[in-house]
Structure formats: structure tokens, C-alpha cells
Amino acid sequence: QVQLIESGGGLVQAGGSLRLSCAASGSIFSSFTMGWFRQAPGKEREFVAGITRSGGVTPYADSVKGRFTISRDNAKNTVYLQMDSLKPEDTAVYYCAAAYATYYTSWRPNNAKYWGQGTQVTVSS
């Protein structure tokens, strides 16, 4: 069992930055592939970024490539999402996810075994 708690969301102007954190507890964090997903009102939950157990492979959605950076600190049981050059279309609830399998490309929400509660990111124009 894994508990995931996100933090760092908020309101920011277009062009600004935010850093999301997801702290994990309850199991061996380093054994999970981690990822960030987001869901805007009226839309399906979509993959944003992923990171393998060692951090060596980090796939991104095309919409965030070059602007967002995912990283993890296995000693702190935490995964991060640095979001730069934010756009209004990045507005969504952002969710942290953990999966048992290894994914070297984007993965689907139903691949996740555990989810955080979500954190709201709002980007104003």
C-alpha cells in the first residue's frame, strides 16, 4: 500500500512557474514507476510526465515537453514536477500516480496502481 500526497499547486500568471511535490509513504518508493497526470474540467485525465525507478527515463506529453521537468529523490520518497513557461491551457487538477510496471513512454491512467488526491493548478492569462 502506498499513500501519495501532492503539494505545490496554486494560481500563477501565464509565463510563470510552479513546482509540484508528491510525497509517498507506506511502501518502498524506489520500486515504483512514478508519474504525473492532469485533468481539466470536462476532459479526461491525461498523462503529463513519467519517471522510471532509477530516474533514468522520463517520458513527457508533447504538450509539456521542454517546459516541464519531472524528477525524483528516492531517499526522500518524493517525486517532483517543475513547471515553467506555464500557459492557461495547463490549468487542471494535477495528480501523482504510482505504477508497478516500468514504462519508457507515456502510460494510461488505468496503468496506475495508486493515486494522490490531486492539487489544483490555475494559470491566468
Image (tube, helix red, strand yellow):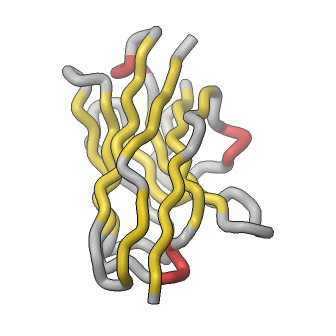
Residue at position x 66%, y 66% in the image? 40
- What x and y, as percent, mark residue 119? 51, 49
Residue at position x 34%, y 21% in the image? 30
Taking the image as shown, residue 16 lies to the left or right of residue 95, namely: left
In front here: 52 or 4?
A: 4
**Quadrant occupied by the N terminus:** top right
In front here: 66 or 83?
A: 83
Residue at position x 27%, y 38% in the image? 72
**Quadrant occupied by the C terminus:** bottom left
Q: Is residue 101 above or below residue 14?
A: above
Q: Quadrant of residue 52?
A: top left
Taking the image as shown, residue 24 lies to the left or right of residue 99, namely: left
- What x and y, as percent, mark residue 4? 49, 28
Q: Is residue 121 above or below residue 86?
A: above
- What x and y, as percent, mark residue 14? 37, 84
Taking the image as shown, residue 50 lies to the left or right of residue 89, namely: left
Q: Residue furthest right?
A: 42
- What x and y, as percent, mark residue 43? 76, 68
Q: Residue furthest front?
A: 11
